[in-house]
Image (cartoon, helix red, strand yellow):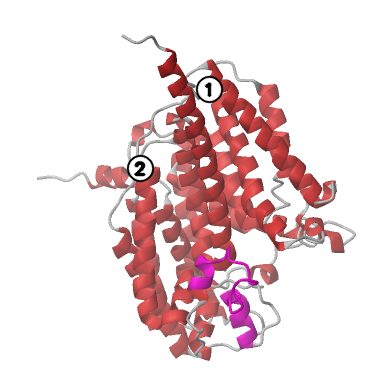
């Protein structure tokens, strides 16, 4: 029996190939061209080589790529694979060969490097065992239908409630930043404003994601009308760009919000797995350095958007996830066993918990004697410093199980044209992007963003469900009895 290997390969790489636009194929080629270029560059540069170390990282790369090829769409499982591909696979190979360290740290021994690589591989294996062989849905975002309401009163109540919430939160944010336009728009000025911890947490983790997602739902529904109200859409875009400025909020949160908006609203026809992978890589390599300029814009007279596009910026601690794991092994660092608990209970104020641990990235930086404290500290590293190797095994297995459960819940069929269908699609997209930052760390801040975005979307869905239920009950009571 003859096997069409070319056709089989196309089905794995491009399911439903005939329905894919040309840009989807271009993004596939672009993604693998990036990987191929990095491999060629790696073979061309001179430096030290350790076969055991290199072999472990190539195993991680192969495992991650296999999973990315297997899943049908970008989801929480694919976000882990993308993280492992670059931060546990490709980048550590270059760091070892070039002898790169961060924060003026001493170079770890080969034994520490190999041990850390083995832990990274172990974390991936345990994650995939917990996650299973789920491939995910192939349905694109375009299946979202225009919002439909059960009655005119339902439409009015939803519109009035959303409008009131938007205005109230906008006024709160403006007042919180003392009605300073520069503080609202630019992160550098906003962080200088005297703030309460509770007010800053509410603004960053909940209020801004709530504003963003309410407007995103409205924009997605408008885009599905026969006659698109461009003026209204433009006004809403300006509103969200002002109060949820992409250069006024942390870069990880900006990526989690604006990448889904780009793919779902502006280029929905090209919303494919490989297109999204290319967008995320572009955001990390090009958009993030630009956004980072605005963190210190208030301390410089001239703004140079290209100042961070250099080798020094790249190796100044932005890709230090694996390096810090190797340093943990080298320095034999262990926590008091409460770091993961502190992450889960991030919302408990220190006034109620005197011994509440600080973020592991800060604690480890102090232990290592580094000047920089806001370093990357991966989730596997968090499990390791708390509970050792068994922490990695059990922790990453549980994370894989949770990711699979969330993927299952957020891809369940929902009634077309309902707010619930919009919330599920947006939640899946935003949490998948945030999942990349959550694994990378620091986990404490990333988990807070994840909970904040999830809470905002849950609140939207819950409030609309209550309004829908009241309107349906009103309709039922108004019907004459048989």
Q: In this view, does 85 lie above or below 247?
A: below
Q: In this view, does 328 lie above or below 37?
A: below
Circle 1 Cα neighbour tier, 10 Å, few/some/many (<14 / 14–19 / ≥20): some
Q: What secondary structure is found at the residue carrying circle 2?
A: loop
Instruction: Pick the quarter of the image with the N terminus.
Output: top left
Q: Earlier in the sequence, mark 2 or mark 1?
A: 2
Q: In this view, does 90 lie above or below 178?
A: below
In the image, which residues are magenta?
Answer: 341-368
Which image quadrant is residue 323 in? Answer: bottom right
Query: Which residue is more in the foreground, 355 or 369?
Result: 355
Is 400 placed left or right of 471 in the picture?
left
Circle 2 Cα neighbour tier, 10 Å, few/some/many (<14 / 14–19 / ≥20): many
Q: Which disc is residue 154 wearing?
A: 1
Indicate the position of residue 405 as horizontal and vertical percent values.
35, 53
Residue 30 visible here? no
Indicate the position of residue 263 as horizontal and vertical percent values.
54, 39
Which image quadrant is residue 205 in? Answer: bottom right
Residue most toward the right?
A: 301
Query: Which residue is more in the foreground, 386 or 70?
Result: 386
Q: What secondary structure is found at the residue carrying circle 1?
A: helix
Query: Which residue is more in the foreground, 384 or 163?
Result: 163
Q: Residue placed at 50% from the left, 84% from the top?
A: 336
Kindly identify which residue carries mark 2: 14
Residue 397 visible here? yes
Q: Is residue 299 above or below residue 29?
A: below
Q: Residue placed at 59% from the left, 64% from the top?
A: 445
Q: How far apart are marks 2 and 1 (CA)?
A: 41 Å
Count how many numbered circles sit on residues in the image: 2
Any magenta on residue 360?
A: yes
């Amino acid at each position: 029996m003859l096997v069409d290997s070319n056709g089989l390969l196309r089905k794995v790489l491009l399911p439903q190939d005939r329905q894919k636009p040309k840009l989807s194929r271009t993004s596939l080629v672009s993604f693998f061209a990036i990987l191929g270029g990095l491999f060629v560059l790696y073979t061309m540069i001179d430096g030290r080589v350790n076969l055991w170390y290199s072999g472990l990282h190539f195993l991680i790369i192969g495992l991650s790529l296999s999973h990315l090829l297997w899943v049908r769409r970008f989801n929480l499982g694919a976000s882990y694979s993308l993280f492992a591909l670059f931060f546990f696979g490709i980048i550590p190979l270059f760091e070892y060969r070039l002898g790169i360290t961060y924060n003026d740290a001493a170079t770890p021994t080969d034994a520490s490097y190999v041990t850390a690589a083995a832990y990274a591989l172990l974390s991936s294996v345990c994650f995939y065992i917990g996650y299973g062989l789920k491939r995910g849905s192939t349905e694109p975002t375009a299946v979202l239908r225009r919002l439909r309401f059960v009655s005119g009163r339902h439409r009015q109540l939803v519109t009035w409630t959303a409008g009131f919430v938007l205005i109230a939160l906008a006024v709160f944010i403006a007042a919180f930043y003392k009605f300073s336009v520069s503080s609202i728009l630019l992160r550098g000025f906003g962080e200088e404003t005297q703030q309460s911890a509770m007010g800053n947490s509410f603004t960053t983790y909940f209020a801004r994601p709530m504003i963003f997602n309410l407007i995103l739902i409205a924009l997605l529904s408008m885009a599905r009308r026969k006659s698109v109200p461009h003026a209204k859409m433009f006004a809403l875009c300006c509103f969200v760009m002002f109060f949820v400025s992409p250069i006024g909020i942390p870069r990880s949160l900006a990526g989690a919000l604006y990448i889904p908006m780009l793919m779902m609203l502006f280029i929905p026809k090209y919303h494919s797995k490989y297109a999204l992978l290319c967008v995320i890589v572009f955001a990390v390599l090009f958009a993030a350095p630009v956004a980072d300029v605005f963190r210190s814009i208030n301390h410089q007279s001239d703004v140079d958007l290209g100042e961070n596009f250099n080798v020094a910026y790249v190796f100044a601690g932005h890709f230090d996830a694996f390096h810090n794991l190797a340093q943990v092994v080298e320095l034999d660092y262990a926590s008091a066993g409460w770091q993961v608990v502190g992450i889960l209970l991030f919302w408990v104020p220190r006034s109620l918990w005197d011994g509440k641990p600080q973020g592991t990235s800060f604690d480890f930086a102090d232990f290592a004697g580094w000047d920089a404290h806001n370093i990357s500290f991966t989730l596997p590293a968090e499990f390791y410093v708390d509970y050792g190797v068994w922490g990695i095994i059990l922790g990453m297995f549980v994370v894989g199980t949770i990711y699979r459960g969330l993927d299952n819940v957020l891809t369940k069929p929902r009634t077309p044209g309902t707010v619930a269908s919009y919330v599920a699609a947006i939640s899946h997209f935003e949490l998948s992007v945030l999942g990349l930052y959550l694994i990378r760390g620091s986990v404490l801040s990333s988990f807070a963003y994840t909970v904040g975005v999830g809470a905002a979307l849950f609140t939207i869905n819950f409030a609309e469900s209550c309004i829908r239920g009241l309107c349906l009950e009103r309709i039922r009571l108004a019907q004459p009895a048989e």
